[in-house]
Each structure stands twice: as C-alpha cells, then as structure tokens.
Amino acid sequence: MTDLSHSLARTVVIRAPQHTVFSFFTVSAKWAAWWGAGSQVDPRPGGAMLIRYPNGVEASGEVLEVDPPRRFVFTMGYASNPKLPPGGSRVSIALEPHDDGTRLTLTHDLPDAAIRDEHRQGWRYQLALFSNVVADEVAAGAEALVDGWFAAWADPDIAARTDTLRRVAAGDVRFRDRYSHVDGIDDLVPHISAAQHFMPGMAPVRSGDVRHCQGTVLADWVVKGADGQPKARGTNVFVLDAGGRISSATGFWGS
C-alpha cells in the first residue's frame, strides 16, 4: 500500500449495544443495508470487501483486522478512480461503550490531502445512514412500546400497570407534559392513578403510525371520553435507550 499520511476522523454516538453495532460490519446483509444492495464483506483478515453504492459506483478492498466488538479495519478504493485504486486507503473503526450506547470512531487514512477532503462529506453522510439502520434494528419494536406505554395509562390494576411500564420503559424513565414532572416508574405509577381519578374513563391511545429516527420516536395520540368522542389530541416524543426501551417521554398537547 502507498504512503497513507493524510487522515480524517469522525466520531458518532449510536443508541445501540456495542455488539449490535459491530454486527453491521460482519454480516453481509447488514453491511449492504448501509452501503447499498449487492455490497458484501467476508469478515476475516484477508477477506474480500465490496461496496456497491446505489449509483453503481463500486469500491473494493480487503479486511485487515476483526476484533469483535471493538475494532474493524479494511482497505478500500475504486476501480473508476486511478488516484485511489482498489485497496488504496485504510479505514479503521473503533467501538467503545458510551452512556447512550456505543461511541464509534472512524479513521480513514488516504494518500493525499485532496482525496482526503473529498471523503469528509461522504463519511458524514455514510455514518448518518449507518446510525439509522442500526437504530432501526434496535427500535424495531417501537410501535409495541408506545402502545404499551399508553395502555399503562388506562390500566386500573397497579401491579399490572407497573409490570407493563417495566417491560417498555427504563426504571428511571422521565415523563414531562403540561401536568407531569415525574422521574422513575415508582413515581409514574401513582401519578397515573391520580390521572385516572381526576379524569375517569379517559386515557390516550395511539393515533396513526409511529415515526422513528435514531432513537427518537414520535407518536400522535387521542383521548376519548365515555361517549367515544375525542376530548384531546397531542404528540409524545419518546427517546429510546440503547436497549430499545423508553428512557424519556415528553407529551405535547394539541388543541
């Protein structure tokens, strides 16, 4: 390999466990999910690496290092670019635990400054795609979490309500809205009892599909009265932890 004295680095934090993040470097279907259909990787030193971008451009190289779930290194370059041929640069990815999931640090070593600078925005974009596909796997059950959260507000059985909340939310979950400032399930359970007492027969239910982006989930809701007519509407913003449970919820009441 030629001299690779020009480097760029980028660090992102992903709301996912370290082993989940690492799997997107070692499973071809997951590798293709953030690069493009037809991309493949053979996750062993000396194994072939192929990236097939959606526009048809291909990059290739070989895997240099596999140290799960901490480090993955490969070479890459382009058949269509004589200044950076296949295997003509080195990409090193390091993973470490973070309070919000996993910190990923990428270093790309390249042969000259101009080629390095051409890749800066590419990695901003590519790691955004990567963060989304990883988070989408972690949040695959987001709809069920949201429905469980709203179901807990309608459940008069304190024990069952507590069990539901412990299944869908972190123990120290935070909830805020116009009428709520509570921290933790032990604080939330009696708060819901009070809501049921002062607003009997009324509880939020999800309205429409949830929307998810990198660990943040939006869910519209409606509260109906005993007559079945809507009494209030709004939107909850849920933040999921690295394990895919609700770590915080903020409710916005509509008109």
Image (tube, rainbow, N blue to C red):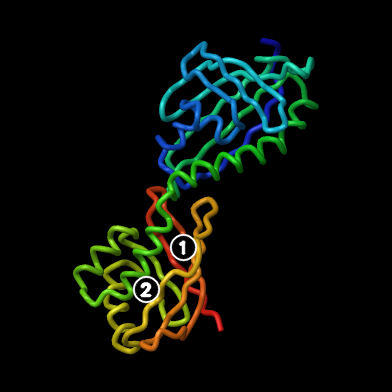
Q: Quadrant of the N terminus?
A: top right
Q: Position of residue 123 (x, y in %)?
A: 66, 36
Whether the residues at callouts 1 and 2 have beta carbons within 8 Å, the answer is no
Q: In the rendered image of this protein, does residue 135 appear above or below residue 194?
A: above
Q: Secondary structure at mark 1?
A: strand
Is 83 situated left or right of 210 in this image? Answer: right
Q: Residue at x 77, y 31 (%)?
A: 118
Q: Residues within 10 Å of mark 1 (few under 14, many from 20)?
A: many
Q: Residue at x 60, y 20 (%)?
A: 50
Is 198 situated left or right of 142 in this image? Answer: left
Q: Secondary structure at mark 2?
A: strand
* Residue 176 picture quarter: bottom left
Is 68 in front, or is 48? Answer: 48
Q: Residue at x 23, y 63 (%)?
A: 163
* Residue 112 picture quarter: top right
Is 37 situated left or right of 241 in this image? Answer: right
Q: Which mark is residue 238?
A: 1
Query: Mark 1 against mark 2, which lies toward the viewer?
Result: 1
Q: Position of residue 64 (x, y in %)?
A: 53, 16
The tag earlier along the polypeptide, 1 or 2, is: 2
Q: Residues within 10 Å of mark 2 (few under 14, many from 20)?
A: some
* Residue 204 picture quarter: bottom left
Is 225 in front, or is 198? Answer: 225
Q: Position of residue 121 (x, y in %)?
A: 72, 38
Q: Amino acid at mark 1?
A: Phe
Residue named by callout 2? 182
Q: In the rendered image of this protein, does residue 250 appear above or below residue 178?
A: above
